[in-house]
Image (cartoon, rainbow, N blue to C red):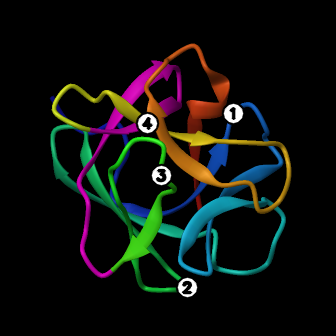
Amino acid sequence: MSSPLPDGNYKIINVAYSNLDADLIDGFVTGGFTGSPSTTNVWTLKNVGANQITLLNAYANNFASLFIKDESVAGSQTATTWTLVSSKANEYLITVGDAQELAWKLLGPWVGAPVRLEAAVKSDTTENWTFEPV
């Protein structure tokens, strides 16, 4: 099975709160305004396996990392391999774990809301993301 997205630079936009995307601010992935001219919300996606990717932040040159339930996704020099799980056309859960049991979840509709790892639920739109090429 090939990856649904090609390697490249993307904004990762939340489905529930479409005015917010994943930004790396002060070492943590948070909700940021999609219209921001900053590159804190640009991620270099690299395919490393079937549906498996790494995400490198263009601004901080750090990878989206950490895979502990109920903790915020953080930036790190060490790459974490994430698995994309399709929930709907062009919408994905960004998951980790042997059974993809944990997913990125945006915890609120405001700028600065944390992105945490929570139990993966395809129907939870706060856990669904779209990838917009930049």
In the picture of the structure, the residue carrying the numbered disc 2 is 59
What x and y, as percent, mark residue 125? 65, 25
Of mark 4 and mark 1, the one earlier in the sequence is 1
Per the model, the C-alpha gap separating discs 1 and 3 is: 21 Å
Residue at 30% across, 82% down:
77
Residue span colored magenta: 77-96
Q: Which residue is at a point 15% across and 28% down the rendered structure image?
A: 1
Q: Which residue is mark 4?
A: 103
Residue at mark 4 to residue at mark 3: CA–CA distance: 11 Å
- Say which amino acid is labelled 2: Tyr
User: Magenta region, mostly helix, strand or loop?
Assistant: strand
- Looking at the image, residue 38 lies above or below residue 102: below
Q: In this picture, is 53 found above or below 103?
A: below
Measuring from the top left, give residue 100's x and y in whole percent: 28, 30
Label 4 Cα crowd, 10 Å radius (few <14 / some 14-19 / many 20+): many
Query: How many numbered discs, if any?
Result: 4
Q: Secondary structure at mark 4?
A: strand
Q: Which image quarter is the C terminus in?
A: bottom right
Nearer to me, 111 or 19: 111
Task: Indicate which disc, 1 or 3, sits on the residue closer to the N terminus.
Answer: 1
* Amino acid identity at mark 3: Glu
Where is residue 32, by image quadrant?
bottom right
